[in-house]
Image: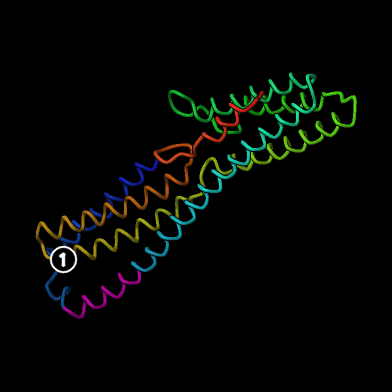
Amino acid sequence: MDSLTIAGIVLGCTFGGTLLGLLLQYVLPSDHLHAESKDVIKLGTGLIATMAALVLGLLIGAAKNAFDAQAAAFERLATNIVLVDRALAHYGPDAQGAREQLRHTVATVIEHVWPDQGPRIEGLAIATISTEGQALYQALSGLQPHNPEQRDAQTQAMQINADMSRTRWQLNQWDDGSLPLPFLIVLVFWLFILFLSFGLFSPRNGTVVAALFVCALSVAGAAFLIVDLDQPFEGLIQTSNAPLRHALAQLGQ
């Protein structure tokens, strides 16, 4: 489910809880809203508010850390791509075929993960990218060095390519996100109860309703950030393809 849909659900649940609380003021018997009852309810909702605030903060921090880690992984991948190309340049003209395969592999990754038009085709585990990676490995392993310098260049290129493969599969593990749906459902339930209590004890006027709507919108914005950062290739906040495009421009030079 995309981040805007989740944010809309959170906004509906929280502000809907506010409206339900305002409605309950007319339905509940007056003795249920005495000062003693209010004190008990406020203690309970205070506990819920504390738990919800802690969880929201932790989720935003975890999502931001995961997003930054994936961005750093792409930067490392781009650096390794350039290093493989430089090692093949040191190998000599015999490695021209491997260099062309490297360029084609990088272009394929960019085309499938960040297409110029339309939605993303597939993730990094798509068969096309795996085939290109296998072809690159075969091109590197198929080199026949004729001197120690070429042998060292081939060994270096093979080692860096192995690190590139590990990075790609690590990125693929992050592709589907890591936010458990039951965790999010429980958090939304807490927020619903919290806003229900807000409406239950709030004066019934437009200013209060508008203020509570802004609060609900802010919580929905936090949910949007959590889900959008957890899906780095979709939504409004996406991992940049600039490192790979810059690396592609450096190949062959």
Name the side, left or right, on which 147 lies relative to 65. Answer: right
What secondary structure is marked by label 1? loop
Name the side, left or right, on which 176 lies relative to 135. Answer: left
Q: Amino acid at mark 1?
A: Ser
Residue at 64% across, 38% down:
79
Q: Neighbour class for label 1 at 10 Å: few (<14), some, many (≥20)?
A: some
- Quadrant of the rendered structure where residue 211 is? bottom left
Q: Which quarter shows the C terminus?
A: top right
The verdict on residue 245 being magenta is no
Residue at 32% across, 59% down:
191
Q: Which residue is mark 1?
A: 202
Estimate the x, y position of residue 149 in percent, counting from the top left: 86, 31
Residue 47, above or below 138:
below
Estimate the x, y position of residue 137 in percent, counting from the top left: 75, 28
- Quadrant of the rendered structure where residue 83 is? top right
Estimate the x, y position of residue 236 in percent, counting from the top left: 39, 39
How has the structure been colored for display? rainbow
The span shown in magenta is 35-48
